[in-house]
Image (spheres, rainbow, N blue to C red):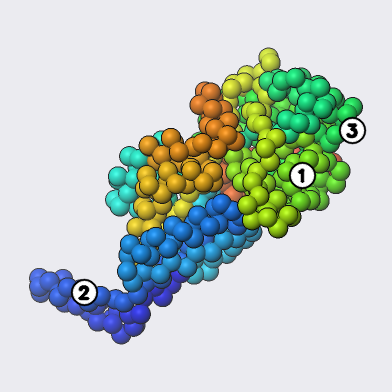
Protein backbone atom coordinates (compact mmCIF):
# COMPACT_ATOMS: atom_id res chain seq x y z
CA UNK A 1 0.00 0.00 0.00
CA UNK A 2 1.03 3.62 0.08
CA UNK A 3 3.65 5.16 2.41
CA UNK A 4 6.22 2.58 1.36
CA UNK A 5 9.23 4.21 3.03
CA UNK A 6 10.11 6.60 5.81
CA UNK A 7 11.02 9.38 3.40
CA UNK A 8 9.16 12.50 4.50
CA UNK A 9 6.98 14.66 2.27
CA UNK A 10 9.63 17.38 2.50
CA UNK A 11 12.30 15.04 1.27
CA UNK A 12 10.09 14.04 -1.62
CA UNK A 13 9.62 17.71 -2.55
CA UNK A 14 13.37 18.31 -2.37
CA UNK A 15 13.98 15.37 -4.67
CA UNK A 16 11.42 16.72 -7.14
CA UNK A 17 13.02 20.16 -7.02
CA UNK A 18 16.45 18.70 -7.67
CA UNK A 19 15.19 16.88 -10.73
CA UNK A 20 13.54 20.04 -12.01
CA UNK A 21 16.78 22.01 -11.47
CA UNK A 22 18.71 19.37 -13.35
CA UNK A 23 16.28 19.55 -16.26
CA UNK A 24 16.83 23.33 -16.54
CA UNK A 25 20.58 23.50 -15.97
CA UNK A 26 21.61 20.21 -17.52
CA UNK A 27 23.30 19.25 -14.27
CA UNK A 28 22.51 15.87 -12.79
CA UNK A 29 21.40 15.84 -9.16
CA UNK A 30 23.39 13.98 -6.59
CA UNK A 31 22.65 10.29 -6.17
CA UNK A 32 19.54 9.61 -4.13
CA UNK A 33 20.08 8.89 -0.49
CA UNK A 34 18.82 5.53 0.79
CA UNK A 35 15.15 5.91 1.67
CA UNK A 36 15.08 3.57 4.64
CA UNK A 37 12.97 0.48 5.18
CA UNK A 38 10.36 -0.55 2.61
CA UNK A 39 7.22 -2.55 3.42
CA UNK A 40 5.53 -4.50 0.64
CA UNK A 41 1.93 -5.56 1.16
CA UNK A 42 1.05 -8.86 -0.54
CA UNK A 43 -2.48 -10.27 -0.78
CA UNK A 44 -3.19 -13.84 -1.91
CA UNK A 45 -5.95 -16.45 -1.62
CA UNK A 46 -3.94 -19.32 -0.13
CA UNK A 47 -5.82 -19.54 3.17
CA UNK A 48 -5.08 -23.26 3.66
CA UNK A 49 -2.04 -25.44 3.66
CA UNK A 50 0.24 -26.06 1.91
CA UNK A 51 -0.07 -22.71 0.14
CA UNK A 52 -0.48 -20.56 3.26
CA UNK A 53 2.78 -21.74 4.79
CA UNK A 54 4.56 -21.81 1.44
CA UNK A 55 3.87 -18.14 0.68
CA UNK A 56 4.93 -17.20 4.20
CA UNK A 57 8.23 -18.98 3.60
CA UNK A 58 8.71 -17.23 0.23
CA UNK A 59 8.08 -13.87 1.90
CA UNK A 60 10.67 -14.65 4.60
CA UNK A 61 13.22 -15.73 1.98
CA UNK A 62 12.70 -12.51 0.04
CA UNK A 63 13.21 -10.46 3.20
CA UNK A 64 16.44 -12.33 3.92
CA UNK A 65 17.69 -11.70 0.38
CA UNK A 66 16.73 -8.03 0.52
CA UNK A 67 17.78 -6.40 3.82
CA UNK A 68 15.57 -3.45 4.71
CA UNK A 69 12.53 -4.90 2.96
CA UNK A 70 9.57 -6.16 4.97
CA UNK A 71 6.84 -8.24 3.33
CA UNK A 72 3.41 -7.98 4.96
CA UNK A 73 1.74 -11.07 3.46
CA UNK A 74 -1.96 -11.65 4.05
CA UNK A 75 -4.29 -14.45 2.96
CA UNK A 76 -8.00 -13.98 2.23
CA UNK A 77 -10.81 -16.29 1.19
CA UNK A 78 -10.96 -16.42 -2.61
CA UNK A 79 -14.46 -15.01 -3.23
CA UNK A 80 -13.99 -12.19 -0.73
CA UNK A 81 -10.61 -11.31 -2.20
CA UNK A 82 -11.63 -11.35 -5.86
CA UNK A 83 -15.10 -9.86 -5.66
CA UNK A 84 -14.79 -7.37 -2.81
CA UNK A 85 -11.40 -6.68 -1.25
CA UNK A 86 -9.24 -6.17 -4.35
CA UNK A 87 -11.79 -4.10 -6.32
CA UNK A 88 -12.48 -1.86 -3.32
CA UNK A 89 -8.79 -1.43 -2.52
CA UNK A 90 -7.96 -0.52 -6.12
CA UNK A 91 -10.77 2.02 -6.30
CA UNK A 92 -9.76 3.54 -2.96
CA UNK A 93 -6.22 4.30 -4.13
CA UNK A 94 -4.79 2.29 -1.24
CA UNK A 95 -4.22 -1.05 -2.96
CA UNK A 96 -1.84 -3.79 -1.85
CA UNK A 97 1.50 -3.66 -3.66
CA UNK A 98 1.27 -7.25 -4.89
CA UNK A 99 -2.13 -8.86 -5.28
CA UNK A 100 -3.77 -11.97 -6.68
CA UNK A 101 -4.54 -11.58 -10.36
CA UNK A 102 -6.68 -13.81 -12.60
CA UNK A 103 -5.93 -11.92 -15.80
CA UNK A 104 -7.72 -11.41 -19.14
CA UNK A 105 -10.84 -9.20 -19.15
CA UNK A 106 -10.69 -8.52 -15.43
CA UNK A 107 -7.10 -7.33 -15.73
CA UNK A 108 -7.90 -5.27 -18.84
CA UNK A 109 -10.50 -3.32 -16.87
CA UNK A 110 -7.96 -2.66 -14.11
CA UNK A 111 -5.36 -1.52 -16.65
CA UNK A 112 -7.86 0.83 -18.29
CA UNK A 113 -8.55 2.39 -14.90
CA UNK A 114 -4.82 2.91 -14.27
CA UNK A 115 -4.65 0.59 -11.26
CA UNK A 116 -1.87 -1.77 -12.40
CA UNK A 117 1.83 -1.26 -13.12
CA UNK A 118 3.27 -2.07 -16.56
CA UNK A 119 6.18 -4.38 -15.73
CA UNK A 120 7.11 -5.33 -19.32
CA UNK A 121 10.61 -3.88 -19.21
CA UNK A 122 11.41 -5.54 -15.89
CA UNK A 123 10.36 -9.15 -16.52
CA UNK A 124 11.86 -10.09 -19.90
CA UNK A 125 13.74 -13.05 -18.42
CA UNK A 126 10.68 -14.25 -16.51
CA UNK A 127 8.54 -14.09 -19.67
CA UNK A 128 10.99 -16.47 -21.30
CA UNK A 129 10.46 -18.85 -18.40
CA UNK A 130 6.66 -18.82 -18.33
CA UNK A 131 6.16 -18.77 -22.10
CA UNK A 132 2.62 -18.70 -23.48
CA UNK A 133 0.97 -18.96 -20.07
CA UNK A 134 1.74 -15.24 -19.64
CA UNK A 135 -0.88 -14.27 -22.25
CA UNK A 136 -3.81 -13.75 -19.82
CA UNK A 137 -1.64 -11.29 -17.87
CA UNK A 138 -0.88 -9.15 -20.92
CA UNK A 139 -2.95 -6.32 -22.39
CA UNK A 140 -2.19 -4.76 -25.78
CA UNK A 141 1.23 -6.39 -25.85
CA UNK A 142 2.26 -5.15 -22.42
CA UNK A 143 2.72 -7.27 -19.31
CA UNK A 144 0.83 -6.41 -16.12
CA UNK A 145 1.38 -9.54 -14.07
CA UNK A 146 2.97 -12.97 -13.99
CA UNK A 147 1.33 -16.36 -13.45
CA UNK A 148 2.57 -18.83 -10.88
CA UNK A 149 0.19 -21.68 -11.68
CA UNK A 150 -1.93 -22.81 -14.60
CA UNK A 151 -4.28 -25.74 -14.85
CA UNK A 152 -7.65 -26.99 -16.01
CA UNK A 153 -10.78 -28.09 -14.24
CA UNK A 154 -12.73 -31.30 -14.42
CA UNK A 155 -14.69 -33.68 -12.24
CA UNK A 156 -12.90 -34.75 -9.08
CA UNK A 157 -14.50 -38.03 -8.02
CA UNK A 158 -14.47 -40.65 -5.30
CA UNK A 159 -13.10 -43.89 -6.77
CA UNK A 160 -14.52 -45.92 -3.88
CA UNK A 161 -18.05 -44.59 -4.39
CA UNK A 162 -17.79 -45.15 -8.14
CA UNK A 163 -16.83 -48.77 -7.47
CA UNK A 164 -19.67 -49.15 -4.98
CA UNK A 165 -22.11 -47.92 -7.62
CA UNK A 166 -20.70 -50.30 -10.23
CA UNK A 167 -19.17 -47.62 -12.46
CA UNK A 168 -16.32 -49.36 -14.26
CA UNK A 169 -14.79 -46.40 -16.12
CA UNK A 170 -14.98 -42.62 -16.05
CA UNK A 171 -17.48 -40.97 -18.41
CA UNK A 172 -16.12 -39.64 -21.70
CA UNK A 173 -19.48 -38.53 -23.16
CA UNK A 174 -22.45 -36.68 -21.71
CA UNK A 175 -24.62 -39.80 -22.04
CA UNK A 176 -22.06 -41.77 -20.04
CA UNK A 177 -22.10 -39.08 -17.35
CA UNK A 178 -25.89 -39.38 -17.10
CA UNK A 179 -25.52 -43.16 -16.81
CA UNK A 180 -23.01 -42.77 -13.98
CA UNK A 181 -25.35 -40.36 -12.18
CA UNK A 182 -28.18 -42.88 -12.42
CA UNK A 183 -26.00 -45.65 -10.96
CA UNK A 184 -24.90 -43.45 -8.07
CA UNK A 185 -28.50 -42.54 -7.27
CA UNK A 186 -29.50 -46.21 -7.37
CA UNK A 187 -26.75 -46.91 -4.81
CA UNK A 188 -28.05 -44.16 -2.50
CA UNK A 189 -25.10 -41.85 -3.22
CA UNK A 190 -25.34 -38.11 -3.96
CA UNK A 191 -23.81 -37.88 -7.44
CA UNK A 192 -22.48 -34.30 -7.52
CA UNK A 193 -21.85 -31.54 -4.99
CA UNK A 194 -21.96 -27.93 -6.18
CA UNK A 195 -21.53 -24.73 -4.19
CA UNK A 196 -24.04 -22.57 -6.03
CA UNK A 197 -24.10 -20.03 -3.19
CA UNK A 198 -20.77 -18.69 -4.50
CA UNK A 199 -22.21 -18.39 -8.04
CA UNK A 200 -19.09 -19.23 -10.05
CA UNK A 201 -19.08 -22.99 -9.26
CA UNK A 202 -22.61 -23.23 -10.68
CA UNK A 203 -21.71 -20.98 -13.60
CA UNK A 204 -18.91 -23.33 -14.60
CA UNK A 205 -21.47 -25.91 -15.70
CA UNK A 206 -22.76 -23.50 -18.34
CA UNK A 207 -19.16 -22.69 -19.27
CA UNK A 208 -18.42 -26.36 -19.91
CA UNK A 209 -21.62 -26.95 -21.86
CA UNK A 210 -20.66 -23.95 -24.03
CA UNK A 211 -17.12 -25.28 -24.35
CA UNK A 212 -18.36 -28.65 -25.59
CA UNK A 213 -21.14 -27.16 -27.79
CA UNK A 214 -19.31 -24.28 -29.51
CA UNK A 215 -16.37 -24.63 -31.86
CA UNK A 216 -13.01 -23.23 -30.75
CA UNK A 217 -13.34 -20.58 -33.46
CA UNK A 218 -16.68 -19.37 -32.09
CA UNK A 219 -15.28 -19.31 -28.55
CA UNK A 220 -12.20 -17.37 -29.61
CA UNK A 221 -14.34 -14.81 -31.44
CA UNK A 222 -16.63 -14.46 -28.44
CA UNK A 223 -13.69 -13.73 -26.17
CA UNK A 224 -12.07 -11.25 -28.55
CA UNK A 225 -15.20 -9.37 -29.63
CA UNK A 226 -17.85 -10.17 -27.00
CA UNK A 227 -20.17 -11.58 -29.65
CA UNK A 228 -22.64 -14.26 -28.55
CA UNK A 229 -24.89 -14.70 -31.61
CA UNK A 230 -24.10 -18.33 -32.36
CA UNK A 231 -26.92 -20.73 -31.38
CA UNK A 232 -24.43 -22.84 -29.42
CA UNK A 233 -24.64 -20.36 -26.52
CA UNK A 234 -28.38 -20.89 -26.25
CA UNK A 235 -27.76 -24.63 -26.57
CA UNK A 236 -25.40 -24.49 -23.58
CA UNK A 237 -28.25 -23.16 -21.44
CA UNK A 238 -30.65 -25.78 -22.72
CA UNK A 239 -28.19 -28.55 -21.90
CA UNK A 240 -27.68 -27.08 -18.44
CA UNK A 241 -31.42 -26.90 -17.84
CA UNK A 242 -31.75 -30.59 -18.79
CA UNK A 243 -28.86 -31.41 -16.48
CA UNK A 244 -30.41 -29.55 -13.53
CA UNK A 245 -33.74 -31.24 -14.20
CA UNK A 246 -32.06 -34.65 -13.85
CA UNK A 247 -31.41 -33.74 -10.17
CA UNK A 248 -27.75 -34.71 -9.90
CA UNK A 249 -26.81 -32.24 -7.14
CA UNK A 250 -26.63 -32.26 -3.36
CA UNK A 251 -29.66 -31.20 -1.35
CA UNK A 252 -29.71 -27.45 -0.73
CA UNK A 253 -27.09 -26.70 -3.36
CA UNK A 254 -28.33 -23.12 -3.87
CA UNK A 255 -27.26 -22.32 -0.29
CA UNK A 256 -24.06 -24.38 -0.33
CA UNK A 257 -20.67 -22.66 -0.42
CA UNK A 258 -17.83 -24.07 -2.50
CA UNK A 259 -14.72 -24.20 -0.35
CA UNK A 260 -15.51 -23.31 3.26
CA UNK A 261 -15.89 -26.13 5.76
CA UNK A 262 -17.17 -29.70 5.71
CA UNK A 263 -20.59 -28.61 4.50
CA UNK A 264 -19.20 -26.97 1.37
CA UNK A 265 -19.19 -28.80 -1.95
CA UNK A 266 -15.47 -29.51 -1.56
CA UNK A 267 -16.09 -30.68 2.00
CA UNK A 268 -18.87 -33.02 0.91
CA UNK A 269 -16.55 -34.67 -1.61
CA UNK A 270 -13.70 -34.81 0.90
CA UNK A 271 -15.83 -36.52 3.54
CA UNK A 272 -17.50 -39.02 1.20
CA UNK A 273 -20.95 -37.42 1.22
CA UNK A 274 -20.93 -36.85 -2.56
CA UNK A 275 -19.25 -38.70 -5.41
CA UNK A 276 -18.16 -35.81 -7.66
CA UNK A 277 -17.42 -32.11 -7.81
CA UNK A 278 -16.63 -30.02 -10.90
CA UNK A 279 -13.70 -27.89 -9.80
CA UNK A 280 -10.23 -26.61 -10.68
CA UNK A 281 -6.83 -28.12 -10.12
CA UNK A 282 -6.56 -26.58 -6.66
CA UNK A 283 -9.35 -28.73 -5.23
CA UNK A 284 -7.24 -31.49 -3.60
CA UNK A 285 -5.37 -28.85 -1.65
CA UNK A 286 -8.64 -27.23 -0.62
CA UNK A 287 -9.99 -30.57 0.56
CA UNK A 288 -6.81 -31.27 2.50
CA UNK A 289 -7.20 -27.94 4.29
CA UNK A 290 -10.84 -28.70 5.14
CA UNK A 291 -9.88 -32.08 6.57
CA UNK A 292 -7.18 -30.43 8.68
CA UNK A 293 -9.76 -28.04 10.12
CA UNK A 294 -12.31 -30.76 10.76
CA UNK A 295 -9.96 -33.32 12.31
CA UNK A 296 -7.52 -30.98 14.03
CA UNK A 297 -4.73 -32.95 12.36
CA UNK A 298 -2.28 -30.50 10.84
CA UNK A 299 -0.84 -33.34 8.76
CA UNK A 300 -4.13 -34.36 7.16
CA UNK A 301 -3.76 -34.77 3.39
CA UNK A 302 -6.19 -34.80 0.45
CA UNK A 303 -8.31 -37.97 0.30
CA UNK A 304 -6.57 -41.00 -1.20
CA UNK A 305 -9.70 -41.98 -3.14
CA UNK A 306 -9.57 -39.04 -5.55
CA UNK A 307 -9.67 -39.43 -9.30
CA UNK A 308 -10.13 -36.86 -12.06
CA UNK A 309 -11.63 -36.65 -15.54
CA UNK A 310 -12.32 -33.85 -18.00
CA UNK A 311 -15.87 -32.64 -18.58
CA UNK A 312 -17.28 -35.14 -21.09
CA UNK A 313 -17.72 -34.35 -24.76
CA UNK A 314 -21.04 -34.09 -26.60
CA UNK A 315 -21.13 -36.28 -29.72
CA UNK A 316 -22.55 -34.48 -32.76
CA UNK A 317 -21.82 -30.98 -31.46
CA UNK A 318 -19.34 -28.49 -32.92
CA UNK A 319 -17.36 -28.48 -29.69
CA UNK A 320 -13.97 -30.11 -29.33
CA UNK A 321 -14.44 -33.17 -27.05
CA UNK A 322 -10.85 -32.79 -25.76
CA UNK A 323 -11.24 -29.08 -25.05
CA UNK A 324 -10.67 -28.00 -21.47
CA UNK A 325 -11.68 -25.03 -19.39
CA UNK A 326 -8.95 -23.58 -17.29
CA UNK A 327 -6.84 -20.71 -16.21
CA UNK A 328 -4.20 -19.73 -13.81
CA UNK A 329 -3.31 -17.80 -10.77
CA UNK A 330 -0.87 -14.96 -10.84
CA UNK A 331 0.06 -11.68 -9.23
CA UNK A 332 0.01 -8.08 -10.39
CA UNK A 333 1.71 -5.02 -8.94
CA UNK A 334 -0.35 -1.93 -8.15
CA UNK A 335 0.43 1.26 -10.02
CA UNK A 336 2.07 3.08 -7.09
CA UNK A 337 3.97 0.10 -5.66
CA UNK A 338 7.73 0.38 -5.01
CA UNK A 339 10.26 -1.30 -7.30
CA UNK A 340 10.83 -3.97 -4.64
CA UNK A 341 7.31 -5.27 -5.32
CA UNK A 342 8.32 -6.12 -8.89
CA UNK A 343 11.39 -7.90 -7.56
CA UNK A 344 9.15 -10.00 -5.32
CA UNK A 345 7.06 -10.92 -8.35
CA UNK A 346 10.20 -12.00 -10.19
CA UNK A 347 11.33 -14.09 -7.23
CA UNK A 348 7.98 -15.90 -7.15
CA UNK A 349 8.41 -16.73 -10.86
CA UNK A 350 11.95 -18.07 -10.39
CA UNK A 351 12.60 -21.72 -11.22
CA UNK A 352 13.67 -22.37 -7.63
CA UNK A 353 10.44 -21.08 -6.08
CA UNK A 354 8.31 -22.61 -8.82
CA UNK A 355 9.96 -26.00 -8.40
CA UNK A 356 9.26 -26.00 -4.68
CA UNK A 357 5.71 -24.82 -5.39
CA UNK A 358 5.21 -27.99 -7.42
CA UNK A 359 6.92 -30.17 -4.82
CA UNK A 360 4.53 -29.17 -2.03
CA UNK A 361 1.54 -29.96 -4.22
CA UNK A 362 0.13 -26.44 -4.14
CA UNK A 363 -0.54 -26.35 -7.89
CA UNK A 364 0.94 -26.76 -11.34
CA UNK A 365 3.92 -24.41 -11.78
CA UNK A 366 4.51 -22.54 -15.04
CA UNK A 367 8.23 -21.72 -15.23
CA UNK A 368 10.13 -23.95 -17.63
CA UNK A 369 12.10 -26.61 -15.78
CA UNK A 370 9.85 -26.64 -12.73
CA UNK A 371 7.28 -29.10 -14.09
CA UNK A 372 9.53 -32.04 -13.13
CA UNK A 373 8.63 -31.29 -9.51
CA UNK A 374 5.02 -32.40 -9.90
CA UNK A 375 4.89 -35.72 -8.09
CA UNK A 376 1.50 -35.30 -6.45
CA UNK A 377 -0.75 -37.90 -8.15
CA UNK A 378 -3.73 -35.53 -8.25
CA UNK A 379 -1.79 -32.79 -10.00
CA UNK A 380 -0.28 -35.36 -12.37
CA UNK A 381 -3.82 -36.26 -13.45
CA UNK A 382 -4.61 -32.64 -14.24
CA UNK A 383 -1.29 -32.14 -16.02
CA UNK A 384 -1.97 -35.17 -18.20
CA UNK A 385 -5.45 -33.83 -18.95
CA UNK A 386 -3.96 -30.47 -19.90
CA UNK A 387 -1.45 -32.14 -22.20
CA UNK A 388 -4.25 -34.16 -23.85
CA UNK A 389 -6.38 -31.07 -24.57
CA UNK A 390 -6.16 -29.58 -28.04
CA UNK A 391 -7.93 -26.38 -27.01
CA UNK A 392 -7.91 -24.63 -23.62
CA UNK A 393 -10.45 -21.90 -22.95
CA UNK A 394 -9.82 -19.40 -20.17
CA UNK A 395 -12.51 -19.21 -17.48
CA UNK A 396 -15.34 -17.40 -19.23
CA UNK A 397 -16.02 -14.79 -16.55
CA UNK A 398 -12.33 -13.92 -16.53
CA UNK A 399 -12.16 -13.95 -20.33
CA UNK A 400 -15.20 -11.69 -20.79
CA UNK A 401 -14.36 -9.24 -18.01
CA UNK A 402 -16.29 -8.16 -14.92
CA UNK A 403 -19.23 -6.50 -16.70
CA UNK A 404 -20.15 -9.26 -19.16
CA UNK A 405 -18.82 -12.02 -16.91
CA UNK A 406 -20.85 -10.76 -13.97
CA UNK A 407 -24.05 -10.62 -16.04
CA UNK A 408 -23.36 -14.11 -17.35
CA UNK A 409 -22.84 -15.57 -13.87
CA UNK A 410 -25.96 -13.87 -12.53
CA UNK A 411 -28.02 -15.27 -15.39
CA UNK A 412 -26.69 -18.78 -14.90
CA UNK A 413 -27.38 -18.76 -11.16
CA UNK A 414 -30.88 -17.48 -11.90
CA UNK A 415 -31.33 -20.47 -14.21
CA UNK A 416 -30.22 -22.78 -11.40
CA UNK A 417 -32.84 -21.15 -9.18
CA UNK A 418 -35.57 -21.56 -11.79
CA UNK A 419 -35.81 -17.82 -12.39
CA UNK A 420 -34.29 -17.51 -15.88
CA UNK A 421 -34.21 -19.22 -19.26
CA UNK A 422 -31.29 -20.16 -21.53
CA UNK A 423 -32.26 -17.17 -23.69
CA UNK A 424 -32.11 -14.85 -20.66
CA UNK A 425 -28.47 -15.75 -20.00
CA UNK A 426 -27.33 -14.84 -23.50
CA UNK A 427 -29.47 -11.70 -23.69
CA UNK A 428 -28.00 -10.53 -20.39
CA UNK A 429 -24.51 -11.01 -21.79
CA UNK A 430 -25.37 -9.07 -24.96
CA UNK A 431 -26.95 -6.25 -22.96
CA UNK A 432 -23.88 -6.02 -20.73
CA UNK A 433 -21.53 -6.01 -23.72
CA UNK A 434 -23.53 -3.16 -25.28
CA UNK A 435 -22.70 -0.94 -22.30
CA UNK A 436 -18.95 -1.15 -22.91
Residue 209 vertical placement versus 280 (above, below): above
Report whether 54 appears left or right of 121: right
Say few, some or many: other residues with alpha carbon within 10 Å of mark 3 (under 14 / 14 to 19 / 20 or more): few
Q: Which residue is mark 1?
A: 271
N-terminal label among 2 and 1: 2
User: CA gap, disc 3 to disc 1?
Assistant: 16 Å
Residue 230 vertical placement versus 351 (above, below): above
Determine the residue positioned at 59% across, 39% down: 281
Question: Which x, y percent locates residue 397?
Answer: 61, 43
Report whether 77 appears left or right of 114: right
Report whether 284 appears left or right of 339: right
Element assignment for label 2: loop
Which label was assigned to residue 32?
A: 2
Q: Which residue is mark 3?
A: 188
Could you tell me if residue 240 is visible in this image?
no
Determine the residue positioned at 74% across, 55% down: 294
Q: Are marks 2 and 1 in contact (CB under 8 Å)?
A: no
N-terminal label among 2 and 3: 2
N-terminal label among 3 and 1: 3
Question: Which x, y percent locates residue 392?
Answer: 53, 30
Amino acid sequence: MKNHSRMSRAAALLATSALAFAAVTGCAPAAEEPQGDVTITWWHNGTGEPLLGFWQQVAKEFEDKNPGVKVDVQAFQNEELQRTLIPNALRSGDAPDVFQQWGAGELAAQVKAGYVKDISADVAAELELVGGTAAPWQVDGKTYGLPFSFGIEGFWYNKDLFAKAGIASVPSTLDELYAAIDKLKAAGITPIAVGAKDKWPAAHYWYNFALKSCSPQILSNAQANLVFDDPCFIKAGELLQQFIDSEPFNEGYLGTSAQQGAGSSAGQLATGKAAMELMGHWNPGTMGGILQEETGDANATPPSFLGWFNFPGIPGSAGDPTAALGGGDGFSVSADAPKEAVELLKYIASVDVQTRFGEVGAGIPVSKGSEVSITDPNLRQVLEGLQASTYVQLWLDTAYGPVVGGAMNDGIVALFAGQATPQDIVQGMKDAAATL
